[in-house]
Amino acid sequence: MNFNNRRAFLKQAATIAGAFSVNSLFNEVHGADFKNAAKKVNQLLPNQITEDEDYWGTIQRCYSVNPSIINLNNGGVSPSPIVVQQAVERYNQLANEGPSYFMWRILDQGREPLREKLANLAGVLPEEIAINRNATEALNTIILGLDLKSGDEVIGTKQDYPHMIQAYQQRVLREGIIYKQLNFDLPIEDDAQIVRAYEAAITAKTKLIHVTHMINWVGQIMPVQKICDMAHARGIEVIVDGAHSFGLLDFKIADLHCDYFGTSLHKFLSAPIGSGMLWVKKEKIEKIWPLPSSGKPHSTDIRKFEELGTRSFPIEQGIGEAINFHEAIGGKRKEDRIRYLKNYWASKAQQIPKVKLHTSLNPKYSCAICGVSIDGIKPADLEAALFNQYKIHTVSIVWENISCVRVTPHVYTTINDLDKFVKALTEIAAK
C-alpha cells in the first residue's frame, strides 16, 4: 500500500470510528465548550441548573434554527444539532466517492458500534436492538409480525398514533383479530384509573396490549410499567410506542417491563431525520416475522429486522453524534430543562382568560408536549393566527375527543421565544 493509499485508508477508518471514539466530531467541535459550561453549574442544585440561561445558551447555539420563525412543533420532528448535520454530510460525501464500496464495505461496518451505543443508552442488550427509520416501521414490524389468529384480541386506545391503529385494523380485515380501543378523557392524574381501564377490557382471548408511552396529541405520560406488570400477571404481552419518550424522559427500556418497544430517534434525541430503533426482548425475537422479508424469518438474530435493502448509511452513522450530544448534556438534566420550558409558558397561559390547557402540569404526567386552546377559536384558526401574525409554528390537533393546538419546545428554545408565545396567546384571546 503506497503512502497516499494508506493515508486515505486511515482517513476512512477514522471516519467510521468517529462517533464512537474520543475523536468524535462532537468532541472536536463542542467538547471543550460543553465541559467549561458544565464546570460553571456543577456545584448548583438541579433546579438551579434547569433555569441557568447562560448554561443553556451554550446548548442553544449548537442548533441552526431559522430566526425568522419560532418553532414550537418539535413533537413532530426535531432539528438536529449542527454537529449531527455535519456528520451526516461527512459520511454522505464519503459514500459518494464510490457508493457500492464505501456504503456496503466501509459505512456498513459502523452499524455494530452504533448498536452498542444505542443499547447502552437504552439500558438493554445490543442483541436486542434493531436500527431502522422511524417508530412506525419499528412498531409495524411487531404489530404485523406477531402470530395472531382470528379471534385473538388486542387492546389499544383511540389516542394511539394513527399508523399503529391502522396496522391493527389491517389485521382485523385480513385475519379477523379483535381490536378493542379504550377512550381516555385526558389529562388524567391517576395511574390506577388508567391501569383499571386496560384491566377491565381483558378477556380470555386477549393476547396483546398496546401502550403509547407519551400520547403524542397532548403529552400525557402513561404508567407503562404498571400496565405491563398487570398484563404479564395475566400472560399478556405489551408493546410500547416510545416515539415521544425516548431521548426526552430519563429512563431505560428495561425499567418499563415491556416486551417490545419502538421509537423515532429524530424527535427528542435530535438524531438525523429518518432514523428509528426497535427493541425486542431477546427470547421473543425468534417468533416475530420480519416486515421486509428475510431468508431466515425465524432467526433469533435481531438483524433480520434490518434487511431494508439500500438505506441511508450516513443517517445511521449520524445517530452516534446525536447520542454524544445528548449524553454531554445528561438525560435527566435535559428532561428537567424541557419540562421547565413547557411549564414556564403553560403556567402563564393558564392565567389568561379564555385559554385552556389540555395537559397536566404535574411532572409525573407530562414533560415537553402541552395542548392549549382558546374558547371560541378552532384549533386550525389558532394555529394559523400564531403563524401568520407572530411567525410561531405549532400544529392543530383535532382527533377523537381532543381539540387543541400542540406546543412542544426543545433544548434550543429560548425563554424569549416562550414569552413571545404567551404574549401572542394573550392578544389572540383578547380579540
Image (tube, rainbow, N blue to C red):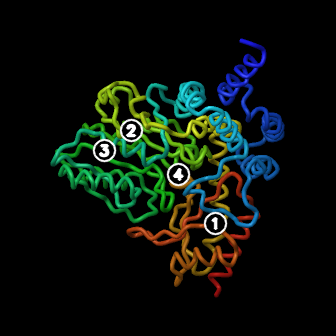
Reading the image, the residue beneath label 1 is: 347
Q: Nearer the viewer, residue 394 or 350?
A: 394
Reading the image, the residue beneath label 2 is: 260
| Label whose residue precedes the other's in the sequence (4 or 2) | 2
CB under 8 Å between discs 4 and 2: no
* 147 sits left or right of 360 in the view: left
Give amino acid for label 4.
Answer: Lys
CB under 8 Å between discs 1 and 3: no
Disc 1 from disc 3: Cα separation: 42 Å
Q: Which of 129 and 89 is in front in this view?
A: 89
Q: Residues within 10 Å of mark 1 (few under 14, many from 20)?
A: few
Picture disc at residue 144: 3
Q: Residues within 10 Å of mark 3 (few under 14, many from 20)?
A: some
Give amino acid for label 1.
Answer: Ser
| Label whose residue precedes the other's in the sequence (1 or 3) | 3
* Image position of 301 with respect to 419: above or below: above
Residue 113 % position (x, y): 58, 25
Classify mark 3: helix, strand or loop.
helix
Q: Can residue 120 be seen in this view?
A: no
Taking the spot 58% from the left edge, 74% from the top edge, the residue there is 383
Classify mark 2: helix, strand or loop.
strand
| Label whose residue precedes the other's in the sequence (2 or 3) | 3
Residue 229 % position (x, y): 35, 39
Reading the image, the residue beneath label 4 is: 364
Give amino acid for label 3.
Answer: Leu
Picture disc at residue 237: none
CB under 8 Å between discs 2 and 3: no
Disc 4 from disc 2: Cα separation: 23 Å
